Amino acid sequence: MTKTLFPSTPVLLVDDEKHLLESFDCLLKASGITNVITSNDSRDVMPILSSMEVSVLVMDLKMPNVSGMDLLSTVSKSFTGVPIVVLTGVSEIETAIECMRLGASDYILKPIKKERFLGSIRRAVEVRDLRRENSLLKKSLFADNLKRPEVFEKILTQSKVMHANFRYVESIAKTSFPVLVTGETGVGKELMAKAIHESSEVTGDFLPVNVAGLDDNLFSDALFGHQKGAFSGALKDRSGFIEKASGGTLFLDEIGDLSEISQVKLLRLLQEGEFYPLGSDTPKRSNARIVTATHKDLQALQKAGRFRKDLYYRLQAHHVHIPPLRKRPEDLGVLVGHIIAEASVLLKKKRPTPPPELRTLLSTYSFPGNVRELQGMIFDAVGRHEGRVMSLKSIREQINRARGTLVKPVENQGNGDCPDTQLTLREGQELRFPTLKEAEQFIICAAMKRSGNNQTIAAELLGMTRSALNKRLNRP
């Protein structure tokens, strides 16, 4: 994302002509790059780089004291991560080639054109950001421990995939690129977005905005704000969320529901780092980190023509996917314990003891609503319980009710054909259709395995009573 380019790490301008330094300084600040250091003495460069981190070094090639070529060679060897943009009034192919060989990221001829100058700096910073990110990612692959585990403490998990996500978040948190968080409804996308914000150690606020249901006018007003008189009822200037999130993180939830017109405006914000409040002809700059989230498949929406391809690629510069709860059953135990404790406090009830078969029962269910659905189930059970051990009645009822709505009956196709089945038996090289007895044995065995050999839960999976299942298990 092109914005105010690392306000905490300055751009260093070096030129022996003071009037050019002042001109470059004004140009950068007018474009939103306010953190600038200038020097008209090339001997100052090495002490400055040794004392602080800079985003990019912009230097003239023809300077007294230390020549531009010598300085370029020294800086590129001693500070390999610093991009160097060379300015010169001499148009010589050999000189340009030599500068690039010594480590310059770009070579610009004077007189300087504004867009060429700003574009070069932005590209240099993006390259620097990518190099830093690649280095951090390599380190994270071999890191077992998190640097700041407290940032992720609200995301309760024992999943290796989730912990890999945490390490990835730590490695990308301080870069400026947008982050896309995907996952099914209820998996905790906003919690992950908050963790990204806290890991980045920015000084601004975390501002969440749900864009689902917002038409273009509401989206523009909420995001960009308006000037007094912009529309009927606009009695005074109002800042939008992108301005309020300055120096922090703007979290746009349900980004897959954004209208096409609003997508164009968001794309401009991401590309140019600027926006127009409603009723204003003067652009404003943004330095807020953009994090988005959706439960929808943006690639599928993009192929269907309902989501801009260029916006999709901008948003998923970094991508964090949160797996559904059914893919991380190891999390059930820690989540259930935490939710029971939380529900007991909020409902002002004595904390019940979960029965041993609770986790087994929950492990047989797919949880389409993920952690949010689990939370609702446990809260309801705690609210109903009266004894020492928590009753599973309400949880069973909810699971059975959900299964009833999720399982669709097979439609009569009118030709006597049945849906294909994968329940086939191999004898030698031949596949044959199983007998009714074999099919029954198969599904009973599968239900017992899924339920951890708990006959009560297996009977519920099969839609029969426990005694009926017991008879089938014990008959010869």
Image: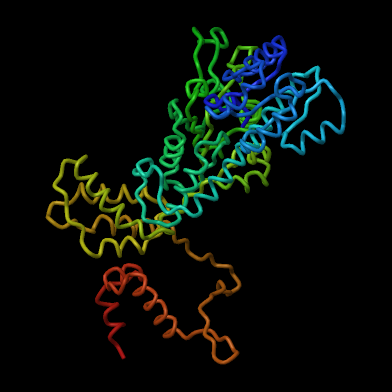
Q: In the figure, residue 270 lies in which quadrant?
A: top right
Residue reaching furthest to the left: 387
Q: Residue at x 60, y 12 (%)?
A: 279
Q: Quick check: 73 above or below 440?
A: above
Looking at the image, how many numbered discs can be counted on the residues? Answer: 0
Q: Which residue is more in the foreground, 1 or 167?
A: 167
Q: In the figure, residue 204 lies in which quadrant?
A: top left
Q: Residue at x 52, y 24 (%)?
A: 242
Q: Which residue is more in the foreground, 188 or 84?
A: 84
Viewport quadrant of the C terminus: bottom left
Answer left or right for 439 relative to 393: right
Q: Position of residue 334 (x, y in %)?
A: 30, 54
Viewport quadrant of the N terminus: top right
Q: Which residue is more in the foreground, 315 or 363?
A: 315
Residue reaching furthest to the front: 65
Q: Position of residue 73 (x, y in %)?
A: 71, 34
Q: Residue at x 61, y 12 (%)?
A: 280
Q: Quick check: 311 above or below 396?
A: above
Answer left or right for 153 relative to 210: left
Q: Position of residue 154 (x, y in %)?
A: 34, 43
Q: Which residue is more in the foreground, 166 or 107?
A: 107
Q: In the figure, residue 115 lies in which quadrant?
A: top right
